[in-house]
Amino acid sequence: MLIAGVCNPRGECPGYNGLYLTSKELVDVAATMRGAPVKAEHSGVVLGAVVSGFVASDGALNCVVRLDETLEGEIVRGLVRDGVASDFSLGYHVDVTHSDKRLVAGKKTLLEVSVVRRGARQGCHIMAYAEDKSDAVHVRRDPWFAFSMR
């Protein structure tokens, strides 16, 4: 199964110092996403891998992931088909240091993309999915999600 959607909303402005990703950091993450592991709810076994990642025209980070044909993958497929798992969530590590009596967010490193019931960030939804050799099922309407597995 291929699953497509938004995994992180528009990035924060340049100069932002916090745990969220800036617009520049989203571009960097998108460039390194291919092959990143896919999990369910940020835990357990790896269920698949990221096929593609890109920053869309609205500034949000989008991805396409493929779920493996394992027992765990089949369970998550069912949760996506049934609308139980309807969001993506980006898992990443942030290096935090102390500087002049304040915390400074440093390098952010992608860990995984998770299929989740409800994401922590607004707008991080699964938009469509496709079983092998079938047309996409559009969970949410957006014109760029018109893809086919044929």
Image (cartoon, rainbow, N blue to C red):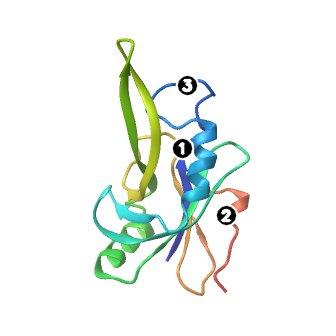
Total labels drawn: 3
Q: Disc 2 designates what residue?
A: 145
What's the residue type where badge 2 is placed?
A: Phe
| Mark 1 vs mark 3: in front | 3
Q: Residue at x 68, y 56 (%)?
A: 142
Give the number of the disc on residue 99. Answer: none
Type of amino acid at the residue the image marks with label 3: Tyr
Q: Residue at x 38, y 56 (%)?
A: 116
Residue 127 visible within the image? no
| Rendering quarter of residue 64 | bottom right
- Residue count near mark 1 (Cα–Cα under 10 Å), binned few <14, some 14–19, many ≥20: some
- Above or below: residue 66 compared with residue 16: below
Amino acid, disc 1: Gly
First in sequence, mark 1 or 3: give its number.
3
Disc 2 to disc 3, C-alpha distance: 31 Å
Which residue is farthest left?
44
Position of 2 relative to 125 (above/below): below
Q: Which residue is mark 1?
A: 123
Q: Position of residue 137 (x, y in %)?
A: 58, 71
Q: Which residue is mark 3?
A: 16
The mark nearer the N terminus, 2 or 3, is 3
